[in-house]
Image (tube, rainbow, N blue to C red):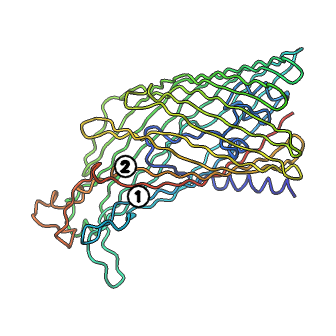
């Protein structure tokens, strides 16, 4: 029965894999995946000291020889549901604030997978191991749709006319494939020291498209060939290397300490673009190349296993990210992770965790100045595990995160002023002539509320 349940879960994840999307705002820095291993994910993405699952080597390469097994293999699948609501302040006729009025709401899904494996052997008091893994590092996937309707009063249960449809479609992932080398030294009966090195190759291709398309109603109202559609396409290639070193030390039966340092990474980012306005296409004559920096990271954590009747793991970790290496506009940040696993009955563990991570949103103004905003994203997690055999485990992890921030309007209102294109003094698409179509800046930004519901499932086997 358990094996049938495990197969059903995995098949469900594969079937859902056709759905794909993510936060539309993070189009430059991308969306960081973190740990895709379901056990670590359920425990707040902790695992700097992890002796149980092969995917532990993705967070700390020194975990390879900490795992007291000659070989291991793991595959993970990940699914996320992202909801994005964009609102503007709503005022009454006396200019009193009433509430935030949502003008665009998008609900999307995205998925991905990761794999990891290792082998190790133990001559005398020394353990030597090598491993490899693949994981997506950053996701640039995203979908956004917004309908522009005129200001005709709604009567007889009719909607105002739709005059344009705005869409943004982003696709692509920054991939990481790494080789891992680890050495373990036995210091005593219940103590050991492990050192690890991670040599990673980063690559990827991402695509960005932003469209403003007038509806047939708008074209028929104004006339054929008057209203210009706008289509912008951008193609980006990524290439580079990433290095990490780590240490994991078992102090005694109850306490373990782990730490990693990820070096600053500079990627080659190559861009070409095509813009079509009113049927006229203009493209980049040469590929633009720039450096793209992933800042260095230092992560430190402890694992405590108290003397309980039911076995318990407690992880507490902190991460220091040097965003200041990107530019003077950025401040360094500290991320926080915590998680607990408690075996309740029949070897079925109860896992829960919490994390709070920092990220930046980057906006380029018309004068090419860069505006950055820091956002904190809290997340609560939980999950469990099904032991299919002594060596085969199915892990499940669930997460819920949320964030709220201000952002510029993705599509400026002045574009829908048909007087720019007709040359007339009055609107044809807007029945109520009192409207003033002006662009909103930081004095009147969008208020964006996002939430994510995610599922991670992993199947691991250790020899």
Circle nearer the N terminus (2, 1): 1
Q: Which residue matches tag 1?
A: 86
Q: Is residue 368 above or below residue 144?
A: above
Q: Is residue 302 left or right of residue 187?
A: left
Instruction: Count residues near mark 2 (Cα–Cα under 10 Å), then give few for <14, some for 14-19, many for 20+.
Output: some
Q: Which residue is mark 2?
A: 407
**On the image, which quarter does residue 253 sit in?**
top right
Q: Which residue is at a point 48% across and 24% down the rendered structure image?
A: 266
What is the number of the mark on residue 322? none
Label 2 to label 1, Cα distance in Å?
9 Å
Which image quadrant is residue 119 in?
A: top right
Q: In the displayed structure, does residue 348 sit left or right of residue 105? A: right
Q: Are marks 2 and 1 in contact (CB under 8 Å)?
A: yes
Quadrant of the frame with the N terminus: bottom right
Give the image location of residue 114, x and y in percent.
66, 39
Q: Position of residue 425 (x, y in %)?
A: 9, 64
Residue that extends furthest to the bottom in the rendered view of this protein: 156
Helix, strand or loop at mark 1: strand
Task: Name the residue: 24% across, 37% down.
Answer: 367
| Label 1 packing within 10 angstroms: few (<14), some (14-19), many (20+) | many
Left or right relative to 175: residue 347: right
Check the image and name the residue furthest to the front: 307
Secondary structure, mark 2, is strand
In the image, 347 versus 140, the foreground residue is: 347
User: x%, y% of residue 85?
Assistant: 44, 59
- Pick the residue in front: 106 or 280: 106
In front here: 230 or 157? 157
Residue drawn at the location 85% of the way across and 47% of the way down: 387
Q: Where residue 461 appears, x then y in whole percent?
A: 82, 39
């Amino acid at each position: 029965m358990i094996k049938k349940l495990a197969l059903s879960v995995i098949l469900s994840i594969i079937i859902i894999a056709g759905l794909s999307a993510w936060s539309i705002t993070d189009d430059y820095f991308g969306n960081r995946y973190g740990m895709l291993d379901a056990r670590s994910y359920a425990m707040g993405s902790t695992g700097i000291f992890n002796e149980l699952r092969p995917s532990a080597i993705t967070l700390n390469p020194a975990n390879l020889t900490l795992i007291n097994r000659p070989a291991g293999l793991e595959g993970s699948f990940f699914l996320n549901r992202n909801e994005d609501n964009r609102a503007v302040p709503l005022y009454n006729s006396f200019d009193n604030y009433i509430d935030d009025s949502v003008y665009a709401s998008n609900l999307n899904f995205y998925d991905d997978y990761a794999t990891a494996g290792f082998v190790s052997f133990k001559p005398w008091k020394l353990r030597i191991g090598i491993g490899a893994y693949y994981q997506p590092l950053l996701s640039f996937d995203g979908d956004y749709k917004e309908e522009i309707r005129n200001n005709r009063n709604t009567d007889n249960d009719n909607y105002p006319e739709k005059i344009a449809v705005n869409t943004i479609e982003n696709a692509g992932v920054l991939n990481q494939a790494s080789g891992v080398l680890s050495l373990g030294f036995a210091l005593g009966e219940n103590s050991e020291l492990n050192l690890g090195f991670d040599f990673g190759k980063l690559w990827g291709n991402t695509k960005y498209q932003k469209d403003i398309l007038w509806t047939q109603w708008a074209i028929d109202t104004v006339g054929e060939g008057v209203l210009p559609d706008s289509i912008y396409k951008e193609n980006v290639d990524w290439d580079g290397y990433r290095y990490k070193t780590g240490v994991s030390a078992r102090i005694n039966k109850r306490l373990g300490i782990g730490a990693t340092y990820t070096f600053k990474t500079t990627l080659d980012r190559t861009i070409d673009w095509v813009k079509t306005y009113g049927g006229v296409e203009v493209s980049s004559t040469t590929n633009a190349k720039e450096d793209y920096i992933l800042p260095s990271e230092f992560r430190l954590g402890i694992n405590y296993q108290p003397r309980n009747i039911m076995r318990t793991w407690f992880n507490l970790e902190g991460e220091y990210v040097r965003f200041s290496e990107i530019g003077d506009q950025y401040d360094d940040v500290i991320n926080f992770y915590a998680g607990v696993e408690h075996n309740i009955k029949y070897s079925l563990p109860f896992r829960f965790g919490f994390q709070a991570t920092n990220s930046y949103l980057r906006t380029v103004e018309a004068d090419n100045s860069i505006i950055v905003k820091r956002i904190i994203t809290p997340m609560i997690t939980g999950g469990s595990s099904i032991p299919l055999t002594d060596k085969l485990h199915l892990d499940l992890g669930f997460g819920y995160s949320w964030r709220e921030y201000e952002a510029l309007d993705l599509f400026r209102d002045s574009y829908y002023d048909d007087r720019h294109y007709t040359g007339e003094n009055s609107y044809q698409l807007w029945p109520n002539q009192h409207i003033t179509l002006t662009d909103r800046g930081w004095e009147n930004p969008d208020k964006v509320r996002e939430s994510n519901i995610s599922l991670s499932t992993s199947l691991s086997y250790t020899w």
